[in-house]
Amino acid sequence: MTTLDHADAARTGARPGPPGAGAAAPQGRRRSGRRLSVRSRWELALLLTPALVLFVLFVLVSIAAAVYYSFFDWNGFGPPTRLVGFANYTKALADPMFQGAVRHNLQFAALSVVVQLPLTLGLALLLNGRFRGRAVLRLIAFTPYVLSEAITAVAWLVMLQPGGAVDEGLRSVGLDGLVHEWLADQHLVLYTLFVVATWKYIGFGVILFLAGLQGVPAELREAAALDGATQWQTTRKIVLPLLGPTIRIWIFLSVIGSLQLFELVWIMTLGGPAGSSATMATYVIDRGFRRYQFGYGSAVAVLLFAVCFVFALLYQRFALRRDTAGALSGRVD
């Protein structure tokens, strides 16, 4: 150590260390950091392993099995032996019933974006205001989402029966002309199911948008009000652009849910009447488990997975990717 070092040590009361002690300390910290890093990696691997094992067993293995069985004409009994190649896929793509199921899924997805989005967003904006009873209204809006799809389907199935609660409610207010066979009319059943699905899932969208609205700085609204902006102008110019990432996430979840729609339809209509409410998922179950065409049903399931996967990939590439980039750079588009 130098004289100045000894003087500093004497002034501060510290004991001078041996030569090289200062250089050794950072090296020791680096070695400790490396050991901690290795330990953290093992802990992370230990925590992730159960989830990864379950994902492989119940997702990847199931997908691989469906792809394998899709190349066979198999009734589900015994090992598959009759290899048919891509015949199941060509049969499905040429089947008018399957084409109708795909069309119904796409109609559901389009209705979700065109009808549910403005309805859910408007309700969220309303419930974001300050007024008495707001908490109760939020609870009422969210309650249907808490119910299982099976309970929702059975309850609405009873209410929509001829002479049920819906028909009697319309008659009680003099709207007898609006009474219909809601689940038996081929031209009406899909829209009836859409109304039920909207009632079931609107609460989720409201909560999602309310969470997004909490991230809109109040200062921006106050500044807009001081500049003379109306409530509509503030919502259109400030709130909606800042809600862009949340809206895009909702659209993604809504479309994927529409493509996978099954339980409500299966319990309420079984895809009927005459396939007018069938979806890709109900078509899979009907062919696979009711008609014992497991090879063909597996092919349809693979097609359904492919549609969802391609949509998710494209949506991530062209819509969600810029949200991720904006979050990393501090921007919101």
Image (tube, grey):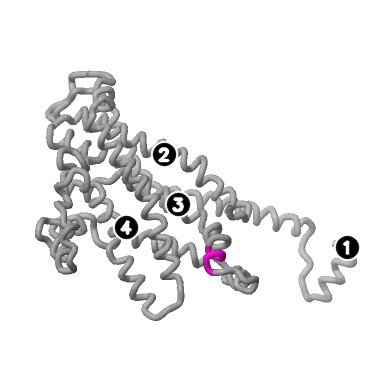
Q: Position of residue 16 (x, y in %)?
A: 79, 67
Q: Name which of mark 3 and mark 2 comes first in the sequence.
A: 3
> Residue 159 lies in what quarter of the image?
bottom left
The answer to whether residue 261 is above or below residue 143 is above
Q: Tell me the crowding category of disc 4: few under 14, some 14 to 19, or many 20 or more residues within 10 angstroms, Cα based.
A: many
* For the residues bearing labels 3 and 2, Cβ distance under 8 angstroms: no
Q: CA distance from mark 1 to mark 3?
A: 64 Å
Identity, as a three-letter code, of the amino acid under mark 4: Tyr
Q: In this figure, which residue is indicated by the disc labeled 2?
A: 311
Q: Which residue is mark 3?
A: 249
Closer to us: mark 1 or mark 2? 2
Query: Badge 2 local density, few (<14 within 10 Å), some, or many (20+)?
Result: some
Looking at the rendering, the stretch of residues picked out in magenta corresponds to 231-235
Is label 1 in a helix, a strand or a loop?
loop
Above or below for 49 versus 78: below
Q: Which residue is mark 1?
A: 2
Q: Distance between the Cα atoms at labels 1 and 2? A: 70 Å
Marks 1 and 3 close (CB-CB < 8 Å):
no
* Gap between marks 4 and 2 measured at Cα: 21 Å
* Residue where numbered disc 4 is placed: 201
Question: What separation in Å lies between label 3 and label 2 (alpha carbons)?
Answer: 13 Å
User: Which residue ends up furthest to the bottom in the rendered image?
Assistant: 132
Residue 296 locus on image (x, y percent) = 21, 28
- Which secondary structure lies at badge 3? helix
* Cα distance in 3D space between marks 1 and 4: 75 Å
**In-image side of 254 versus 326 (left or right):** left
Q: Is residue 130 above or below residue 121?
A: below
- Residue 50 makes an appearance in the image: no
Which comes before the other along the chain, label 1 or label 4? 1
